[in-house]
Image (cartoon, rainbow, N blue to C red):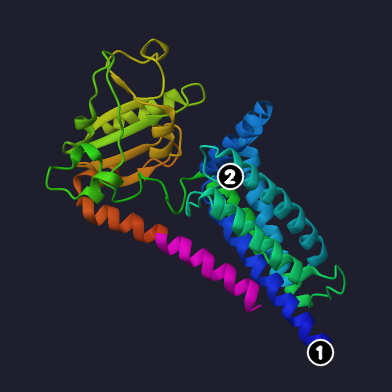
Amino acid sequence: MKRGYLRFRRRAAGLLGFVFLISGILKLWDPVGTMLIVTEYLKFLHMPGLIPAAKDIGIALPVVECLVGIGLITGVLRKVSALVAYIMLGGFTLLTLAIWIWDAPMDCGCFGQAIHLSHAQSFWKNVILIVLAVIAFTPFKEFGRAKVRKGVSAVMATLAIIAAAVYSNTHLPVVDFTAFNWGSQLFASLDEEASEKAFRKAPILSFSNTDGEYCDDLAATGKVLVFSVYDPKTVNWDLLEQHYRTASFTEAMPLLLVSARPEDVRLPQDIKPYFSDYKTLITLNRSNGGGAYFYYGELIHKWGVRQFPEDLFGDVAGDPDALSTRHVTRRRVTAQGFCVALLAILTLL
């Protein structure tokens, strides 16, 4: 009877661990998006002094979630993992309750940008997880000892999570959950025959020239390479100018979108900037100064400022659908491969 109850507790802990692990991975894959969520929380808590550290918090938090998940699944340091899980769940539950009561205009970000929950759903989700934690960790003893091979499993999984954190912090998200994902169609490119659903889903760049005239049609005509700068103070202007000039020799029209006032931008006279807002540009491309290739308004490819395509000329001259399919498939295989490998390490080893 006692052995059966312990097995039931461990399964409950494992289920809770998978929730923590999935939540952490989804945030980890998009550290810039997680930074935006953390910033909203800090504003809600009236803690503006911590906003400069929002990105660091946005990386550290999902790493801790993943480590807690690994500990609960493998049983390695399960008591420590249980204690941290209790603390995190308690804090998240109180926070989501406060957000629900005050109806704050923000997303909970429980699963990053992948899954959006209402304030009520977020709160009750945490309540359910607390109940699961009580089942798994009461009484707070007799956690047992993990097998040696589970220690190896935990170490390998931890190294995989660290590698994912480093990769995500230096590359675009492996999976893009924003409105500007691969294959999305710009609002300006839709015709009158498009469905109402298409109009609702279509992202809007909403950029203007120095005279304040909106020029969204430019990005929806033919082949266009859009370079986006959401933070002019930190972008590498020399590297960006080099990419822009390379793009100008291709079949596509280069466009530079900047989140700034016209008088604050200092560029060579032959580079004409356009202007959009911070939120739009950081959603379009998580890399400050990165590029996006549009073909008649359809987003074909994106890259970071330091991952410029090796054969941009060939990419632009080739079949847009083939290019998009190739990159989408590569990213999908990478994401699925990582998840399958991590699951195998945690459950089969």
Apparent side of residue 89 relative to residue 113 in the rendered image (left or right): right
The image quadrant of residue 132 is bottom right
Q: Is residue 165 magenta?
A: no
Q: Residue at x 51, y 47 (%)?
A: 30
Give the spatial CA distance, label 2 vs label 1.
42 Å
- Residue 323 in the image: x percent, y percent? 27, 53
Q: Which mark is residue 307?
A: none
Apparent side of residue 234 relative to residue 281 in the rendered image (left or right): right
Quadrant position of the C terminus in the picture? bottom right
Q: Which mark is residue 1?
A: 1
**Name of the residue lying farthest toward the top:** 263
Apparent side of residue 297 relative to residue 131 in the rendered image (left or right): left
As drawn, 242 above or below 342: above
Amino acid at dot 2? Trp
Q: Are marks 2 and 1 in contact (CB under 8 Å)?
A: no
The residue under label 2 is 100
- Which residue is nearer to you in this view: 14 or 140? 140
Q: Residue at x 28, y 22 (%)?
A: 208
- Residue 43 in the image: x percent, y percent? 61, 31
- Residue 6 in the image: x percent, y percent? 79, 80
| Between discs 2 and 1, the one toward the N terminus | 1
* Helix, strand or loop for the magenta stretch, by majority: helix
Q: Residue at x 68, y 71 (%)?
A: 14
Start-end of magenta stretch: 332-349
- Does the image show residue 313? no
Quadrant position of the N terminus in the picture? bottom right
Amino acid at dot 1? Met
